[in-house]
Image (spheres, helix red, strand yellow):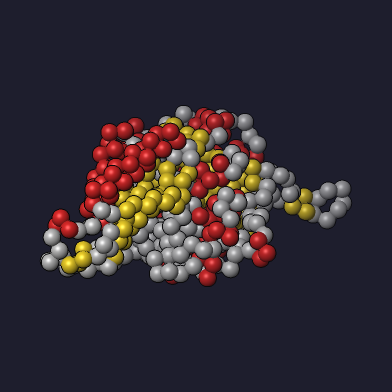
Amino acid sequence: MAQVADFEQMWRDLVPIGRSASSGGYFRQPWHAAELELRAWFREAATVRGLEVEEDPFGNLVAWWSPPAVEVRGAPATSLETPGAVLTGSHLDSVLDGGAYDGPLGVVSSFAALDLMRERGVVPARRLGVAAFVEEEGSRFGRACLGSRLAVGATTWEDARELTDRDGVRLGDVVAGPADGARSTLLDGVATYVELHVEQGRGLVDLDAAVGVHDGIWPHGRYRYDIAGRADHAGTTRMEDRADPMLTFAMTALAANKQARVQGQRATFGRIDVRPNGTNAVPSHVTGWLDARAESDAALASLVGEIERQATERAERDGTTVTVTAESVSGEVAFDTALRDELAGRLGGVPVLPTQAGHDAGILQEAGIPTAMLFVRNPSGVSHSPYESAEMADCLAGVAALADSLTGLVSGEAPA
C-alpha cells in the first residue's frame, strides 16, 4: 500500500538525523544543526506533495493542503477559502539524549495520513495543515511548548527573546522575531487541531490497544530552586562550620520524591548546576530544576508548596537560603469533549486516557482551538530516552486512525 511505503521511507530518512553514536539517543535542539536539517526535510516533504509552506517569525512551520480551485459563474478559478481550517502535526525537536518518536512520529504520520487521504480520493472542503512547532521540549531555552505559546500569544516576544540557553545565547539573537511586536498569524482561521503522539507510558500496553485518544493533560510546571551557601575548603572546614547548599538540595530532592509518592503525583529534579563545581570545595551555590506534575491544579499547588516548605526548613538548619522561581506553569487541560468523543467513535471505540505529559495540543486547546490527541502504543513504556519505542504495525495503525479522523473533519462527514 502507498501509505506503508511513504511512512517507512520518511521514517528511514529521519532516523539518522541527530542520533548519538554512543547512546543511540537524539540531540535535536532547536536551531542547531540536526533540528535545522529536520526543518529542511519538512519543507522538502511539503514541496513534493504540492503543499504551501508558511513560517511565522518564531520558526513555527505549517504546510497547507487547500481545497481545489472552483469555477464560480464564469469567474476565474479560485481556491475555496472556507473558514475553519483543520491542523495536525507535532514537533521535530527532542530532549537531550531523547527518543526517536516523541514529536517526529506525529509529523511523519501527518504527511502519511495526507497521502492516504489522497489515495482514498478525499477532496477537502476545508484547508488542512501539517504543523511543526518549534522548541516544544524546552530543551534549549527552558520554556516548554515555546513555539506554540508564541503562535497563540500565550507568551510574548518581549519575554521570550530574553530567554538564554546553557551557553548564554539569547533567543532574540537566534531568531529575528516579529517586526514592531506584530503577532503570529500562522494559526488564524484554524478551527480544529488533532495531534498524534507516541504514548509516553504503558496505558495502551496494559489495555492491549495500538491506538488511543487522550482526554486531557495533567497540570505541570518547571520550578528553579536557587540555593545559596558559602564556598569553603573541603578539607579544612569542619562539618559543623559549613553553609553547604548541596545538603539543602539533596534533602529537597529526597523530599520531592517522597511527597510525590505520598500524594500519588510526579516530581523530578532532572537538572542541576553547581558553583564553583570543584571537587575539593564546598559549593557556594546550587541551582536545581524541579519538574512537577499532578492530577489537578489544586494537587499541583499542594505538591509544589510542600516541597518548597521542606526545602526552606532545611535551609534554615544548613545556614543557606532558598529562592524558588516558577519558570513555566501549565494548568489542567481538558481536551474538547465533543471532538474527543467524535474521534473515539469514528475509530471504533478506542481507549480514552489522560496524559501526564505536556504537548502543543494543550496550548492550542487553552487558546480556544478545539483540540484532540491520538496516541500510539509504546511497548517499552519509556519516553524521553533512547529506549522509547513503537512497532511499525502500530505506527501504521496510527496513520490510518489519523487519516480517518482528518477525513471526517475536512469533509464534514458525520461520525461513523
Q: Residue at x 83, y 48 (%)?
A: 72
- The one of 320 and 20 positioned closer to us in this rendering: 320
Q: Compare residues 33 and 293 and report the one nearer the observer.
A: 293
Q: Kindly give the residue lying farthest to the right in the view shown.
A: 74
Most foreground residue, 9 or 149? 149
> Which quadrant would residue 142 be assigned to in this image?
bottom left
Q: Is residue 46 among what the camera can see?
A: no
Q: Which residue appears at 50% of the width and 32% of the height? A: 344
Q: Quadrant of residue 292?
A: top left
Q: Is residue 284 above or below residue 374?
A: below
The C terminus: image quadrant = top right
The residue drawn where x is 41% and y is 58% is: 139
12 left or right of 185 in image: left
Q: Residue 222: percent from the left, percent from the top?
A: 41, 49
The location of residue 404, given as percent across then percent down, is 54, 39
Query: In the figure, is residue 261 to the left or right of 179?
Result: left
Residue 301 vs 90, above or below: the answer is above
Which quadrant of the figure has residue 351? top left
Q: Is residue 224 visible?
A: yes
> Residue 359: x and y, percent?
47, 46
Q: From what the image shows, is residue 165 above or below residue 340? A: below
Task: Please state the horizontal and vertical placement of residue 38, each as a whole percent of the image.
Answer: 47, 63
* Residue at 61% across, 40% down: 368
